Image (cartoon, coloured by chain):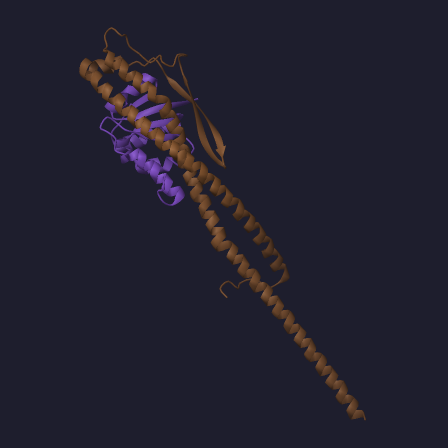
Amino acid sequence: MPSTNVNPTRMELTRLKRKLVTARRGHKLLKDKRDELMRRFLELVKENKELRRKVEHGIAEANKEFALAEAVMGSEAVKTALLAPKQSVSVEASSKNVMSVNVPVFDYKTRTADKSDIFSYGYASTSADLDMAVSSLSKVFPDMLRLAEVEKACALMAAEIEKTRRRVNALEHVMIPDYMEKIHYISMKLDENERSTQIRLLKVKDMVIQKNYDAKHAAQ
Amino acid sequence: MYKIAAIGDRASVYGFAALGLDTYFVTAADEAKKLIRKLEDDGFAVIYITEQLAELIKDELARISEAPLPAIIPIPGVYGNTGMGMKAVNESVVKAVGSDIV
């Protein structure tokens, strides 16, 4: 018997039985949580990958266009053109609770009402390539923000899934078998005690009867 | 109200200034770490970082990935796509599922 450091008493037995019930219920709930988290996680990862491909492609394109603009205008001119940005974005970050994981939700606002108000320079002195570059970058921006949201959610959910999985496994393979073994040990011990009491009583009864019998015979 | 930043080498991130992002030009690892800590305190919710730079400060990013904010997102720089961003996604799958299944 490995873990026999329990008191074989009825009180301990009821306590352990109650604990076993709680552990079983917790195990079931956590398992459900893990499964649902996993389902959502896989959905999100799919979206994450798609977005990432799109964003990476978009940024690569924009970089090419910026390089072209720089080649046409000279890098100093490009830098000057973008020196004083007209637009500024801010995000409203709220959080959404997905299976007890708080994932962020970003909602972005631009300072000027027109979201396409991104050209911070006069058109006269700049090349059209720069306009193209800036506008293609602004096209990928909503996807970039969504990517930030999804990627963060994925990272947080992955951590939560790992934690939940550990808990489920600990309950399933350690706690519950341990409780069951202890309960088994206690009930066996109690049964054994009961049997030995019964035998002792039988013996005592036999002895008493024998004694009475002997006393009766001696008197005759 | 949170802000958005883009950090990395100058050529990779200066374009984002046009969109209204705050851009910071850093290339050294310890400089970047310091900057990220500062940005965390200054209320930035999203930080885009070039993959080249992200590669240098992986330990710092791992620390932040557990916190709800900010979200630090690696993006390809002008020197091309290192595939690090995609790898990070796959790593999170491995972490959650136990093996790379998607």
Vertical side of A73 occupied by A50: above or below:
below
Describe residue A156's horizontal placement relative to residue A66 as left or right. right
Whole-percent x, y for residue A90 in the image = 40, 20
Residue found at x 24% / y 19%: A65
Describe residue A68's horizontal placement relative to residue A166 as left or right. left
Query: Is residue A62 visible in the rendered structure shown here?
Result: yes
**Residue most toward the right?**
A220
> Residue A216, located in which quarter of the rendered image?
bottom right
> Residue B81, located in which quarter of the rendered image?
top left
Whole-percent x, y for residue B69 in the image = 41, 31
Q: B20 or B95: which is nearer to us?
A: B95
In the picture, the quarter occupied by the C terminus of chain B is top left
Please count the marks in the image. 0
Describe residue A69's horizontal placement relative to residue A16 as left or right. left
Describe residue A199's horizontal placement relative to residue B91 as left or right. right
Residue found at x 34% / y 35%: B61
Q: Which chain is purple?
A: B
Whole-percent x, y for residue A47 in the image = 39, 31
Vertical side of A126 occupied by B90: above or below:
below
Whole-percent x, y for residue B88 in the image = 33, 36
Chain A rendering hue: brown
Residue found at x 27% / y 29%: B76
> Residue B14, located in which quarter of the rendered image?
top left
Query: Is residue A82 visible in the rendered structure shown here?
Result: no
Residue found at x 41% / y 37%: A42
